[in-house]
Image (cartoon, grey):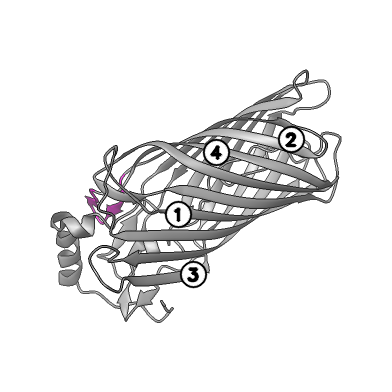
Amino acid sequence: MSSGSPAIEFSGLASLVILLMSVYNPVLQAQTCSCAGAPLISSQNFATVPGGSFMGGLTWEHNNISSLYSGANELNNRTQERITNTALLELSYGISDKLSVTGTFTYIEKSRTTGLQTQVNPSTITTSGIGDGMVMMKYHLINQDLWNPYQFSLGVGAKIPFGTTSLEANNVALNADMQPGTGAWDGVGWMFVSRAIRTLNMNVFLNGTYRYTGTAERFNESDNYTFGNEFVAIAGVSGAMWDRWSYDGQIKFRSTTRDQLNDFRLPNTGGEWLSLKTGVGYQVHDWVNLRVFGELPVYQQLNGTQPTTSFVLSASVFFSFSQNQNGFIYGTGE
């Protein structure tokens, strides 16, 4: 179990050794992962929040990162298993019918088990803590209502480094991808467009988010880590099934650039992912909605060799303190 004791002060020579090992050691290369903390940028669930209304959502997400890929090819010699569980609290308030503000807060737990095929007793490391957060202003250029089937919204915000980056195991500082936070401020841009097809009682939407990552100084001035910039695009359809039940189907594309340690771009980070996500919802009350989702990757093209997502499960409860004439309208993400 990791602890939050003070980080080890690495010398410049030690940092250089770590860098060279990450370049030349193929075993260490296979342990890296494009995992930049909590899944914040694809968690924006509310596209429309009417003026004076308050909406919230609590989501639990389980990400199993146990597949091992080299490029687009899956490898069978899997030696480790990674699990990430995240709780996300999203709160949105409509300042006016055109402008709303959203805050997202997270708690994250990560575990990594190594030596599954090479050791009699595999080793597991678990970390947990408050993750990074995000605040975003959303401007609704076109609002969907009873007379207009279209909606178009833009948003801009920042990811805030609430999470720690100094956790250790056995008095050794853990890698950046096992820390609850990233330690850096990021800029975030967001877009949402949708159209209601009332004859079919459904809504089609497109959601895009881009995150420009900042750099975190983790332990000293010669240990600056930058996660890769991230782009997520989601196309989906949602609608009513029967009684209080609803459905949601999505195609998600995610792309990240390589992570960077100081001036060196790490070879086994970054890539592209395409996945399918489907879910069902149940309207418990006029102001309470429950949803569960499952997500499976269908294609991935990774840089080098990396552990990657096998499947994702999530469950959410959404609530509104001011019911509007449209009910819940979701622009859901990862």
* Residue 179 can be seen, yes or no: no
Q: Nearer the viewer, mark 1 or mark 2?
A: 1
Residue 99 belongs to the span the image colors magenta: no
Query: In the rendered image, which quarter is residue 27 located in?
Result: bottom left
State which tag comes first along the sequence, 3 or 1. 1
State which tag comes first along the sequence, 1 or 4. 1
Which residue is denoted by mark 1 in the rendering? 64
Which residue is denoted by mark 3 in the rendering? 128
Structural crowding at the residue carrying mark 4, measured as other residues with C-alpha within 10 Å and reported as few (<14), some (14–19) or many (≥20): many
Which residue is denoted by mark 4 in the rendering? 277
308 sits left or right of 187 in the view? left
Q: Gap in Å between the C-alphas at discs 3 and 1? A: 16 Å
Which residue is denoted by mark 2 in the rendering? 98
Instruction: Label 1, secondary structure: give it.
Output: strand
Q: In this picture, which residue range is highlighted in magenta?
A: 258-267
Query: Front-most of 275 and 219?
Result: 275
